[in-house]
Image: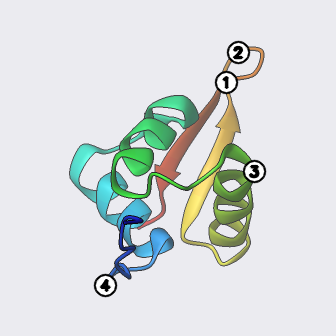
Amino acid sequence: MPAVKIWKTHPAHFVLLEILNKKGDMTDDDLFDALHKEFEDLGYKDFNDLLMRLEVAGKIRSSSMARGKRRIELVQ
């Protein structure tokens, strides 16, 4: 019998903002790992799309740290 999928009560962008609110500024890899625990089917491309939408909306800010690393911070 296949596993039954259950709809999440909170969308991914809401959970991402909650994680940043609780833990503060994070690298994109750490944030992806924390979000991936809640949304197991979330891929890195979807994660980047989510970050882009939140940054355009003015909710978060991302800045480059080192090669391939970004710092994600919540805009208050």
* 68 vs 10, nearest the viewer: 10
Q: Are marks 4 and 2 in contact (CB under 8 Å)?
A: no
- The local crowd at label 2, few if under 14, some if 14 to 19, many if 20 or more residues have their Cα within 10 Å, is few
Percent of width and height locating residue 57: 66, 78
Dot 3 lies on which element? Answer: helix
Percent of width and height locating residue 5: 39, 73
Residue of label 3: 45
Q: In whole angstroms, how far apart are the C-alphas of marks 4 and 3?
A: 22 Å
Q: In whole angstroms, how far apart are the C-alphas of marks 3 and 1?
A: 15 Å
- The local crowd at label 3, few if under 14, some if 14 to 19, many if 20 or more residues have their Cα within 10 Å, is few
Image check: 48 left or right of 54?
A: right
Dot 1 lies on which element? Answer: loop
Q: Are marks 2 and 1 in contact (CB under 8 Å)?
A: yes
For marks 3 and 1, give the one nearer the viewer.
Answer: 3
Q: In whole angstroms, how far apart are the C-alphas of marks 3 and 2?
A: 20 Å
Q: Tag 4: residue type? A: Thr
Q: In whole angstroms, how far apart are the C-alphas of marks 2 and 1?
A: 5 Å
For marks 3 and 2, give the one nearer the viewer.
Answer: 3
Relative height, residue 59 to residue 52 (above, below):
below
**Disc marking residue 66:** 2
Relative height, residue 11 to residue 50 (above, below):
below
Q: Tag 2: residue type? A: Ala
Q: Nearer the N terminus, badge 4 or badge 2?
A: 4
Which residue shows up at 57% across the image and 55% down it? 42
**Disc marking residue 9:** 4
Residue of label 1: 69
Q: Outermost residue toward the front?
A: 1
Percent of width and height locating residue 11: 44, 78
Image check: 37 left or right of 67?
A: left
